[in-house]
Amino acid sequence: MLVALILLGLGFLVVQGEQGAVMIAVGIALGSLAGLELSIREHFAGYRSHTLLLSGVAGAGTLALLLYLGPGDLDQGARLAIAAAVFGLFAWSLAAAFRRRAGVAFKVR
């Protein structure tokens, strides 16, 4: 997270060329990965349920893989249906994992 903050700060200070934009993009990517890692740890420790966030990442990753690496003749509706199915399967399994660890379906704090 510290590296992400440093890159974001330096990226906004560097105004010349594309280097500042690259630093900002890498800082945002590193910060997003740090947040994702924290939500994974909290979810599987039974502290907070991050079921929808983690399922959304899995669904969006599946959709991105299908768009860039999947067959070119696959319909967009089929891609969305596959991504939605992955989202649903992950949501179901992550909710069950949280329920086993925390003893409840969700926690309100």
Image (cartoon, rainbow, N blue to C red):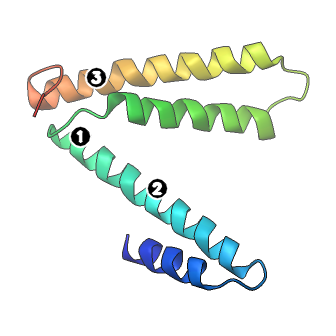
Which residue is farthest right? 73
x and y percentages locating residue 32 in the rendered image: 46, 55
Which quadrant is home to the C terminus?
Answer: top left
In the image: residue 64, left or right of residue 74:
left
Whole-number angstrom distance, CA of label 3 to CA of label 2: 22 Å
For residue 44, which numbered disc appears in the image?
1
Of the image marks 3 and 2, the number of the one nearer the N terminus: 2
Dividing the picture into quadrants, the one containing residue 72 is top right
Percent x, y of residue 33: 45, 57
Disc ID at residue 95: 3
1 or 3: tag closer to the N-terminus:
1
Q: Is residue 45 above or below residue 31?
A: above
Q: Nearer the viewer, mark 1 or mark 2?
A: 2
Q: Residue at left 79%, top 32%?
A: 70
Q: Amino acid at mark 2?
A: Ser
Q: Amino acid at mark 3?
A: Ala
- Nearer the viewer's eye, disc 3 or disc 2? 2
Q: CA distance from mark 1 to mark 2?
A: 19 Å
- Where is 73 relative to 101, above or below? above
Residue 35: x and y in percent read: 37, 54
Q: Are marks 3 and 2 in contact (CB under 8 Å)?
A: no
Q: Residue 9: x percent and y percent?
A: 49, 79
Residue drawn at (39%, 60%) of the image: 34
Q: Which residue is mark 2?
A: 32
Name the side, left or right, on which 46 lies relative to 69. left
